[in-house]
Amino acid sequence: MTDAPRRAPARARRTGRLTPVFFARHLLRLAVSLAVLVVASFAMIHLIPGDPLRQMLGPTAPKELVHARRAELGLDESLPAQFGHYVQHIFSGDLGTSFFSSQPVSDIIAHGLPNTLALAVLATLVALAVAVPLGMWSAVRTHQGRRRRTETAFTTLTGAAVAIPEYLYGLALLLVFALGLGLLPPAGLTGPASYILPVTALSIAPAAMIARLTRVETLRELDTDYMRLAHAKRLPAWRRYAVHLLPNTLTATLTMGGLLLGGLITGSVLVENVFAWPGLGQRTVEAITQKDYPVAQAMILVYGALVLLINFLVDVALGLLDPKSSLSASTRQEG
């Protein structure tokens, strides 16, 4: 009887069995999604109104130059042949050459992608570190209808935080802490302090969203038998919440954190431009405004592949953490 509070959470935390059917199903879904992404990125150039090459060279460019450039890029071949070359180049790591800088697109991505990933990963970690304790604190304080004012303040503030776009946070932080008070670097990547403002701007809305989810999960767990028993035994608060409660609220929270990481990678484009961050965001906006189609095409491919890969890893992690995620796959296999 004395070990019940420890055994109950252990049963709730048992890991799922990652069955072959479960893994193969999600791997097949990833492969199909990547194939669709490749087709869509290839079709982007051909769906643009007008002649992209003419737009690049200008309306006064001689026809001979346009034809020569088209032949050089392989745009005079049939669509199936162009698509075959496109897929072959992707697998070889050749994503083309920028129309304007003549720089290999793979070099552009290799230079900017680590900075973009660092920004998104740090923002996700900060959001989780702030949101999980905040959501649990709010749930414990407002459990069973107590402290209505605290509940109202929490839901109002977090709801408003989610509704505000990240780039507006970035502009406000830039005006106050960089340009106004001069406490932090306003732009670029010059050292560890350069991360503070863009990471903060990216993490506020996700932190509010995760805090709301954590509160809901915590309220559900607080009404379980093992938590009632732990409370009845007068266990210390840190043991009840950190040892017994926290692990049982993390599955949904970590899943949301993984999904938000994919969203932050793509959503950091505007924030990177606000802080002149040397990531993919600036190059993406430049490629779109300058109609640098090879770079824009590659950015769509890279951003989409990252989001799909992160979603796949989240599904696999959830299958390991939550037995119910892999149970259905194993049941179908046995049937």
Image (spheres, grey):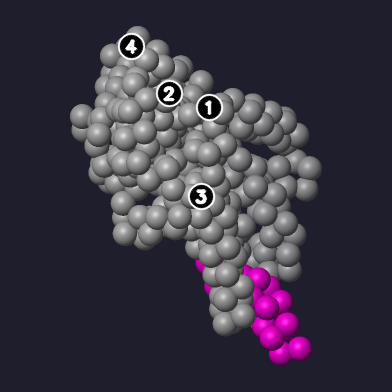
Q: Quadrant of residue 228?
A: bottom right
Task: Pick whichever of labels 4 and 1 is earlier in the sequence.
Answer: 1
Task: Pick whichever of labels 2 and 4 is earlier in the sequence.
Answer: 2
Amino acid type at circle 3 is: Leu
Q: Which dot marks residue 179? A: 4
Q: Which dot marks residue 50? A: 1
Give x and y (percent) for residue 244: 58, 65
The answer, for residue 152, to whether it is visible in the render is yes
Give x and y (percent) for residue 206: 54, 39
Q: Is the N terminus in the top left, top right, bottom left or bottom right quadrant?
A: bottom right
**Residue at coordinates 42% horizontally, 25% vertically from top-left?**
54
- Label 4 or label 3, whichever lies nearer to me, is 3
The majority secondary structure of the magenta stretch comes to helix
Q: Residues within 10 Å of mark 1 (few under 14, many from 20)?
A: few
Give x and y (percent) for residue 154: 65, 33
Q: Quadrant of residue 287?
A: top left
Amino acid type at circle 2 is: Gln
Marks 1 and 3: CB-CB under 8 Å? no
Highlighted range, magenta:
315-335
- Residue of label 3: 79
Marks 2 and 1: CB-CB under 8 Å? yes
